[in-house]
Image (cartoon, coloured by chain):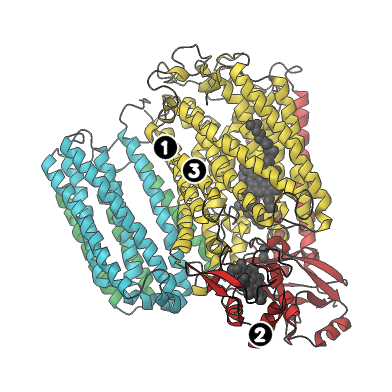
Amino acid sequence: MSHPLHKDYAGAKLGMWLFLFTELILFSGLFLLYGAYLARYPHEFAAAGREMHLFFGTLNTAILITSSLLVAMAVTAIQRDERRTTLLLLGGTVLCAAVFLFNKYLEWSAEIGRGIYPGSPKLVAGPPGESVFYGLYYLTVGLHGLHVLVGGTLLTVVALRVRRGTIHGGDYVWLENGALYWHLVDLIWIFIFPLYYLIL
Amino acid sequence: MTKDAQDNTAHSIGYGKLTAVWLGLLCLTALTVWVSRLDLGIGHVWGSLAIASTKAGLVIAFFMHMRYEGRLLRLLLFVALLTLAIFIGFTFFDVLYR
Amino acid sequence: MNPAEQNQTETGSFWNDTGRTGIAAWIFSTDHKRIGLLYFYSVLSFFLIAVVLGVLLRIELMAPGRTIMGPQAYNAVFTVHGVLMIFLFIIPGFPGSFGNLIMPIQIGARDVAFPRLNLFSWWLYIVGAAAIVTSLFTGGGPPDTGWTFYVPFSARTGTNVTLAVLGVFIVGFSSILTGVNFITTIHRLRAPGMTWKRLPLFVWSLYATAWVQILATPILGITLVLVIAERVLGAGLFDPGRGGDPIMFQHLFWIYSHPAVYIMILPAMGVVSEIIPVFARKPVFGYNMIAFSSLAIAAAGSLVWGHHMYTSGMSDTAILVFSFLTFIVAIPSAIKVFNWVSTLYKGSISLEAPMLFILSFILLFSIGGLTGLILGAAATDIHVHDTQFVVGHFHYTIFGGAGFTFFGAMHYWLPKFYGRRYAEKPAVIGWALMFVGFNITYFSMMVLGLKGMPRRYYDYLPEFAPLNLTSTIGSWILVGGLVLILVNLFRGLRSGDPVGQNPWGGATLEWSIPTPPPTENFSADPVVTHGPYDFKGAGIP
Amino acid sequence: MNPSLITTTQAVDPVFKFIFGASIILLFGITAATVTFVIRYRRSRAPEPTSLTSTNIWLEIVWTALPTVLVMAMFYYGWSGYLSLRNVPKDALEVTATARMWSWNFTYANGKSSPKLYVPVGKPVVVNLVSQDVLHGFFIPAFRVKRDVVPGMKNHVWFVAERAGSYDLFCSVYCGTGHSNMISTVEAVTPAAFAAWLQQEGGAEHGGKELLEKLGCLGCHSLDGSRGVGPTFKGLYNSRVKVRQNGRLLTVTADDAYLRESIRAPAAKVVDGFQPVMPAFGDLKDEEVAALVEFIEGVR
Ligand code: HEA
Ligand code: HEA
Ligand code: CUA
Ligand SMILES: [Cu+2]
């Protein structure tokens, strides 16, 4: 039982969940700041929020939700030993991740083009609340983007191991944990989206 | 083997159910965008947060299998969320009363 | 790194398990005992460096005006002293070293749940530490912000804050992974019969600590990221000129850093609860209360961060709430103290070195904690905040509490892993010197604080001179003691008398296996049939 | 002063006495118990434990309840004491304390300003705290008052000097190299003397040297050629200065224009080999800057 070499699924999953908690709290720090500053600058935040590209935001939300679905299905698929479907679904997930990042790239270059980026002259000159809003926006979304990148890579590795057969219906805890991580990335976006694109 | 963490990794959820959840999430997304067009003043914040939380709940319960996990994981998740709430909530003892 | 390696004849001992040789056998080993020793020697090295810095601080403060260094140097020295002591010594200290060495054995496991992750944590720790050390010699020179990195100063100063902060971030990540590893281990790998009620109190305290590590450290992480963002991107989130609020930084910082002080003390309290029963030959008094109060401290400890900010301009409502909760945390600590003392009642007490350190812990921690009450009360904290009184308080709690316990643990557990022990007499003398020197050093600081001498002061008014001199002299006695016990301890571990399987007569599992422990700890999976302090049940005479 | 008013000192000291008192009793009790047990039950005297009881519900209850009651009392006194630190008496005299690296400057209602805090004995004083750069701390040990000086935030403290005399005033929050030099004094004088002092001319002082001292330039700049946090003023005028202008290294002549800019916007051109820590003195009047420049030019 207490032998380290023995594979302990519940253990591995428990560990993963604990790690997800830390990720959650990491972002909560930024949400905390968001809340505090929203309470102080409701109008500047509203004004800045309207400047955001709702289109990109909504599109990316849909994309992430879909990717979440695909990876969740991948878990079901591997449980049913359907290797090809698993691979397809994982491929789909990673593709979504890529598209998501591409959209972010477009969105950011658009904003930077408008002279909106941390410490930009426009913001330094503008009303205090806006500079705070965009500062938070770039940090939060940037950090989230980093997580998308990591998650995408993780799932790619998992996919390769599925192909090699080291992950299979009998031992797929890697895939499951990879999926959990990906869901977390989705989860955080679910909150980022309304806070930055929709508030007021 | 100790009782407090049971191995029930094996539970699997059908494609149909997952797709249903997915549709639900998309509808909620549409809903939250629509709500944000209405003119509710500060109500937006709570409105969209409520919807977001529902979405999060769906993802955790089904996509992340929490609905089928043992008591332990649910308890721990609760502890984590509680801590999160405290960290943010207690800061507002300062922010709101300055 | 392992003086005793030569004289390990016993085959199967973890010292000479086959496979890699030389240094690689250590820095790539996933054996929890080797990782534990890696941590032990890493944290000890940084402790010794930081300690020398501390002595330098005292020498500078020996007399008003410039003694050995200029103001800028002084600021850098106390910053580095604080950063090394907090982030590289005391926080990773207990979980990393004794947690790794002892906890898996005490729960009857062969290793932690994720051995590779465990090794990775140590590597992260080393990388982070390397970054911090590099920051001292590169860029604008060593950081001069104080270990609290308060903005806006930390965002403006030209010193090498960014790299140091990055290093601390990495070390924090390592601490998180250790927490994840320990919680999973304690949940999943307990041997048959090792019920929660039979869990040694050291394991209980590590369990509580691990939760704090997991739930609080990420906030430190994001806070440090924000500091870097301020400096590198000019995000302006805390820049008053652009709508930012420096007080928010203080909230974020203390949301982690208060719970962090319980990361420092909880494992120490666990060690105390292990050592006292063994040297009193008596089951610990109030096992349930002690175990529970560890969790209570961990929980309540995350509700009180505001007590570092009474003077900051935070709202009075917040001060009301945080002051109230601060007093609540004192209660579980009080319960522990009372239980420890009554464990001694009608026992059979032997005063050997480990026990001496632990008994002095009770006194020193009580002083530190009770001064904490002065700090917790709004009215009094206003006067002593940011004075030497605070410095006295936390040296009593950290160094007198956690530090002394660390030395106690070294004398109690290291012989188990080296198969040899220190000489008793020098250890006792060294302890006495440390105890006396300690009180001279830090009690003077408390009085200075009450008289109004602020902290982080390179220079001071003449009226503070006598007590500063006293404090400095005290620190030399302290040095003497510490050098003595360290030299004696390590000489003993290399060439002292051999020790048997159970030198102290402990009833926890680590004493039921050979000395030094074999690689896999247990030849067969143990089945636990008695509680951790049931000496009769363990058949100890 | 009106007797009903309790001073900040009178509000805080009893709390100290109470908590210290309780703590000392507890500490003594705990230590005494430990020592007696260790002596009474040392192994040579008690080879075997004479009791193995490991729990007693009543004891546990007692020493959970006792501390609870005690700390609640401590909390209550602490809080009530704090409240009287916060309730500023209505008739308090207003002063504004301006903190910048690393000097204090106190401005009075009539525009008079001074590097020392002059107050009338017996009259409550409320000090509004303003920071020009980073966090500082306004700390007067004698009156048990302390408050951080936070840029962009309105903080205040109040106190009343009961006896004439001069009391230390420290900067309590770490603010860089000169932190421990950021010291001033409170000069408590009789109301009459205070009134006289307040009316003295020279409120808007223009002599360059006085300004230099008042604004705390000398906290960073020496006049004797020694290198401080900032470059010395000795022989600065018309010398060639190596400066960094957003990154680029270039050499300029220290003429009037340059000196003006260096005072109003020091960050524009940062002297090579120094930190850009000089606070901007944009708020100075032109003639003040002129006076400063004139003086600096005179330092040879
Ligand atoms: C190991 C670390 C450690 C521990 C355990 C503690 C324990 C406590 N600390 Fe301390 N503290 C620090 C480390 C620690 N602290 C550090 C590093 C700082 C400075 C940070 C900085 O600014 O650099 C600090 C600063 C600090 C402050 C801010 C001071 C200021 O800057 O103004 C406060 C304020 O409330 C405080 C309070 C307390 C309290 C109430 C406890 C309580 O947990 C104490 C509980 C213990 C006891 C109460 C004693 C034992 C019990 C008895 C003897 C029985 C009788 C007791 C009763 C009846 C109550 N601490
Ligand atoms: C684990 C925590 C820890 C420990 C153990 C210590 C140990 C010491 N500290 Fe500590 N100190 C802090 C944590 C700690 N400190 C923190 C967090 C701060 C706040 C920093 C800030 O303000 O930002 C601080 C600040 C601080 C100050 C206040 C600076 C100021 O505000 O102006 C002072 C001043 O005297 C001081 C002194 C000392 C001394 C003399 C020691 C002694 O050195 C301890 C006694 C031990 C010895 C003397 C050991 C001697 C051993 C050797 C010399 C090596 C021998 C070599 C071999 C055997 C190979 N420290
Ligand atoms: Cu100003 Cu310290
Ligand atoms: Cu604290």
Query: The chain coloured red carries which letter?
Result: D
Residue tagged 2? D290
Height in image: A115 above or below C329?
Answer: below
The amino acid beneath tag 2 is Ala
Chain B in the picture: what colour? green
Q: Which mark is residue C130?
A: 3
CB contact under 8 Å: marks 3 and 1:
no
Residue tagged 1? C181
Marks 3/2: CA–CA distance: 50 Å
Q: Is residue C158 left or right of residue A99?
A: right
Report the mark closest to the observer, 3 or 1: 3
Report the mark closest to the observer, 2 or 1: 2
The answer to whether residue D91 is seen in the rendering is yes
The amino acid beneath tag 3 is Ala
Q: What residue is at 77 percent from the left and 24 percent from the top?
A: D40
Chain A in the picture: what colour? cyan
Q: Position of residue A90 (x, y in %)?
A: 18, 48
